[in-house]
Image (tube, rainbow, N blue to C red):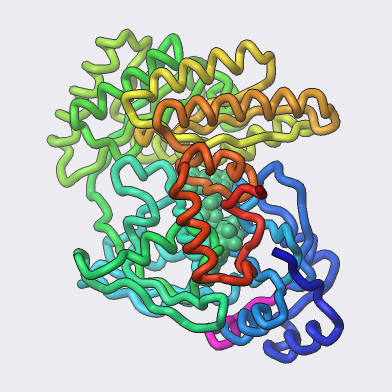
Amino acid sequence: MSFNPLTPLDIEALAAMVDASRFSTGDSVLDLHAKDQSHHLPQRPEVVIWPIDSSEVIAIVTYANDHLIPVTGWGSGSSLEGNPIPVHKGIVLDFSRMNRILSIREKDFQADVEPGVIYQDLNTQLRHTGLFFPPDPGARATIGGMIANNAGGTRTVHYGSTKDYVLKLSTVLANGEIMDMGSRVKKTSSAYDLIRLFVGSEGTLGIVVKATIRLAGLPSEFSAAISNFSSVEAASRAVFEILRAGLDPTALELLDSECINLMNEEKNIGLNASPTLFIEFSGPTLNQLSETMALAREICEDIGCDEFRAGLGREDRNRIFEARHELGEMIVRNHPDGRIRIMDMAVPIAAYPEMIAESRQALTASGLAGYIFSHAGDGNIHINVVGKKDDSKQWVQVDTLTDQLVLKALELDGTATGEHGVGIGKRPFMKTEHGKSLEWMKRIKALFDPNGILNPGKIFPSS
Ligand SMILES: Cc1cc2nc3c(=O)[nH]c(=O)nc-3n(C[C@H](O)[C@H](O)[C@H](O)COP(=O)(O)OP(=O)(O)OC[C@H]3O[C@@H](n4cnc5c(N)ncnc54)[C@H](O)[C@@H]3O)c2cc1C
C-alpha cells in the first residue's frame, strides 16, 4: 500500500472539519501520539484530531480514504505492542473527548458508551447500581481501545475478556459509511457475528464510534489468598489443579520471585520472595467462599507450597492487586537504562506448567534480566525481558529469546498474544499461528478497507 503525505491543502480541509482547539500539528502533540507503552520505535503522525461525534469521524475518514491518507484511532495510548503507533504517519484520531456515557440501563445490565470512556470512570459511575464492567487491563484504558485490542486482565479467568461484553457496535468504515452491528439481546443465533470480527481488529476494519456493553453484578463477598512455592513450575501445577477442580477463581495470578522482590521494595508489602500465587474468589456468601478456599489450600499444600495465607482483608487484597497492576511500571523504573520487551503468549491450561518451565529455564540460561508475571488462570504468560537500551548485541539476544518463547507457545497450540494484540511485534508469527486462514483475514481486510488506510502496518506480516 502506498499513501500520500498530507499537503497544505489537506491540512486546510481537515482543519475546517473540527473546531480549531481540536486539531493540532504541534510538535509536542505529535510526539505524545507517536508512542504507546511498548518498546517499539516511535512514529509521529502528521496531524492529531479530537473528534466529538460520529459525523466528524465520517467526514475525516471519508476525506482520508479519498486522498489515501492513513487514519489510526487513539484511546489512551496504553497498548503494549505498538498497536496505536501511526507507523505510516497520516491522521491520528484521539477519542479522549468523545467520552460520554450515553445511557446506563441497569435493568438490562447494559450501558451505551462513546469510545473514549475510560473503563475505571465508567465503573465509578456504576458503583451505586451494584453493576460493573469486568475487563480490567489495569492501565487507564478507553473502552474503544479495549474493544480494538480485545483487552483482558486479572479477572478474565472468571469473567472473560472484552469480546464477551460487547453487544452492539457502531463503526465508521473506511469509505465513510456507518455500520451498526450486533443486538441488545444476550443471546442470538442470527447470521454472521460481526462483533467478534471487529473486536480485536485493532482499528484496522473500522473506527468504533459507539458501543453497547454488557455489565455484570458486583459480587457481595470476596476472599483472597497468597501461596508461595519453591519454583514457578510447582506454582503453575497448582494453577492447573485449582482450575481442574472447578474452583472458578475470580483472579489467579502467578508472580516469580523477581517480581515479588520489586513489589516488596517499592510497596513495602512484606511478601516472601518466592514464586507466588494470588488467588481470589468471589460470590454471594462467606460460607461458600470459605469452603472453596479450603479446597484451594488443600491443592496448594498437596503440591508442596511453602505457605498458604488465606483470609486477606479487603485492604490487603487491594494493596496487593494495586502493586500487581503497577508491576510493569516498577520494572521500567528499576531498569532506567533498559529497553523492555513485553511478552503475552497464552497456551491451553494443560500446557501451562511446561510453558512456564521452559520460559524460566530459557531466561536463566540467557543471563538476561526477566520477570514472569501471569494471568495464570487463563494460561496467559507475561514475561518482561530487559536488554540495555544502547547494547544492540543484547537486543539481538532479547529478540532471539522472546521469539523462541512465542514459537514454543505456538508449538503447544497456544497463541502469540493472549490480550495485548498483534500490533507491530507479533506480526511475524501470524503465518505460523493462522496458516491459510491468514489469507482469508487479508481478504476480509481488503473488503472493508480496500485502500488499507485504517491503522496500516498492523496485524499482517510485511511480506
Ligand atoms: C501498566 C499496564 C498494564 C496493562 N495490563 C494489561 C492487562 O492486564 N491486560 C490487557 O489486556 N492489556 C493490558 N495493558 C494494555 C492496554 O491497557 C490495553 O491494550 C488497552 O486495551 C489499550 O487501551 P487504550 O485506550 O490505551 O488504547 P490505545 O493503546 O490508544 O489503542 C489500542 C488500539 O485501539 C485502536 N483504537 C483506539 N480507539 C479506537 C476506536 N475508537 N476505534 C477503533 N480503533 C481504536 C488503536 O488504533 C490501537 O490499535 C496494560 C497496559 C499498561 C500500560
Q: Dividing the image into four quarters, tell me where ligand 1 lies.
A: bottom right
Q: Quadrant of residue 123?
A: bottom left
Q: Nearer the viewer, residue 427 or 316?
A: 427
Residue at 52% from the left image edge and 74% from the top image edge = 99
x and y percent of residue 244 in the render? Answer: 22, 26
Q: Is residue 172 above or below residue 235?
A: below
Magenta-colored span:
48-57
Horizontal and vertical percent position of residue 151: 46, 51
Picture coordinates of residue 31, whole percent (x, y): 79, 60
The outermost residue toward the bottom is: 16
**Residue 267 visible here:** yes
Which residue is drawn at the image coordinates 75% and 86% (left, top)? 15
Q: Is residue 156 above or below residue 290?
A: below
Q: Is residue 375 magenta?
A: no
Q: Residue at x 43, y 60 (%)?
A: 199
**Relative side of 15 to 307, left or right:** right
Horizontal side of residue 40 vs 355, given as left or right = right
